Each structure stands twice: as structure tokens, then as C-alpha cells.
Amino acid sequence: MINRLTEDIKNYIVHLEKDGIYISIQTEFSEYMLPLIDYYIHRNPKCLVLKSDAKMWDKCVSYHNSTVTGKNGYEIKKCHAGITEALFGLECGGNIRVSSDREFDEDSLCTVIKPLCRMVEYLEMLIPKNETEITENELVNRCIKFLQRNFSRQLTNGEIAHFCSCSESSLCHLFKKHTGVSLHTYINDLRISCAKELLSVSNQSVSSVASKAGFPDYNYFAICFKKKTGVSPSEYRRNI
């Protein structure tokens, strides 16, 4: 149930991004919420470009102005770069932050963001609160946490299993059972996601992007990227 809900949340956020609405989730990330950790930082392309500079990142984090409260109860902020952001409070603590290149229509924004808030709050309710509630999901989520931190380097199933304190066969079986994909597929998906971000917000060469995303072989990267996206890395960059 937890894995299905996190996947539903990710799919909903992707749907919003297609409409130019960018989401970040600012709350306490337990091991069970780690599949959503990519959404902890702002994903607005303008924000990603600005924050590629360390000093600008610090400025973005520390400085907001023109805070007002919308008629529907959420906060609206505008940063020094002129990007508008809306903050929707979560009952479980923290907030959903929404940014866009255009002005918000408050009623429309509430209509699409409130369901997302409810999903995140429900996810928090489902998360085990003590050791007696923890199932084999814990092992899978520890594995996911490790992969999300280390996908850009070369990994073996043995190394991953050692980190999770279980056998390779058990890890592979449980991972496929709870995520629906193999370890290999999950790692490649993380790398492709990273490559798409780099292609979108940087001027690095495609071969450099492949290497930084964790693909030591460019040809293999190109094959995996086209299989996942339907276009080559160069075509993907041109179509952005």
C-alpha cells in the first residue's frame, strides 16, 4: 500500500509538472518516504539553474519576501529572482511548496494541490511508528535509500545486499516483490532521471552527462535513454 501510494504521488506530481506547476515536499522524510526524496528540492527549471551556483543556493534558501496569505489559507511568497511560490501546510508537519512561471489562480491551485496534500498526509499515517509494525518493507526502503545516494557510481548486487544485511537472492526477490522492478531496472531509472535533469539545466556534453549519471559506457547510456524516453539524449535536449 505504501509503495503504491508513493508511486501515485510521484505520478500526480509529474502530471502537474506537465502543466508548468512544480512541486517540492518539505516534511520529515522517513525511510518509507525516500522514494519521494527527489521532490525535496524545488524542481522549477529556473530554480535549478539558479541553485547550480552555491552562493545563489544559500541566497535562495535564506531569502524570501512579499509574503501574503491567499484567500484559501495558504501562503504566497516571491523570491529575489521573481519566482512565485505557494505554501500549503500539511497536518503531519511541513508543507507542499508550489512554484510556477505564471501567476497563480488561487481557486484552481487549491483544486489541484489539496488532493496532493491529502495523499502525503495519508502516506504519513500509513508509515510504521514502532518496530512491531515494521515488515520486510523496511529492508526494501533501506535499499532504496542506499541506491538513491549511490546510483551514480558502479554498484554490485553483492555490495547492495551487504549494506542491507541480507543475501543477494533475498534482496532481489523482496525488491522486485515490493517495487515491481528489478534492482538493475531501478538503478538505471535513477540514472536516466538524473541524466534528464542534467540535459535540461546544464550545457555539459552528453558524454559528460552519461558519466555523471553513472553510465561508464556512452553507447549503453544512449540505448537505455532511448528505450526509456523514446528519443536519444541529444534529441531530448533539443526538444526541451
Image (tube, grey):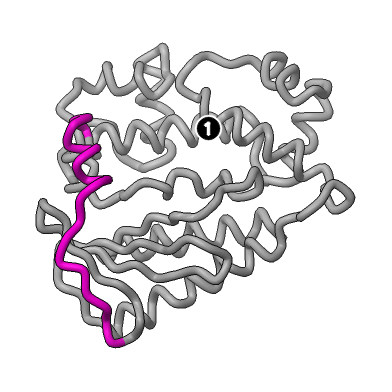
* Residue at (60% x, 28% y) in the render: 146
Indicate the position of residue 127 as horizontal and vertical percent values.
Answer: 71, 57
* In the image: residue 221, left or right of residue 56: right
Q: Nearer the viewer, residue 84 or 218?
A: 84
Q: Is residue 86 above or below residue 230?
A: below
Q: Which residues are magenta?
A: 52-71
Q: Is residue 107 magenta?
A: no
- Figure disc tally: 1
Q: Nearer the viewer, residue 38 or 238?
A: 38
Q: Nearer the viewer, residue 81 or 32?
A: 81
* In the image: residue 137, left or right of residue 16: right
Indicate the position of residue 219 as horizontal and vertical percent values.
Answer: 36, 17
Q: Is residue 123 above or below residue 231?
A: below
Indicate the position of residue 93 as horizontal and vertical percent values.
Answer: 53, 63
Q: Is residue 235 visible?
A: no
Q: Specify the quadrant of the image occupied by residue 165.
A: top right
* Residue at (19% x, 20% y) in the render: 205
Q: Is residue 160 visible?
A: yes
In terms of secondary structure, where does tag 1 sit? helix
Q: Label 1, on which residue?
A: 148
Amino acid type at circle 1 is Gln
Quarter of the picture containing the N terminus is bottom right
Farthest right residue in view: 132
* In the image: residue 201, left or right of residue 111: left
Count neighbours of disc 1 (C-alpha within 10 A) and say few if under 14, some if 14 to 19, many if 20 or more.
Answer: some
Q: Nearer the viewer, residue 40 or 227?
A: 40
* Residue at (73% x, 46% y) in the render: 178
* Residue at (11% x, 52% y) in the render: 80
Q: Is residue 81 above or below residue 54?
A: below
Q: Is residue 55 magenta?
A: yes
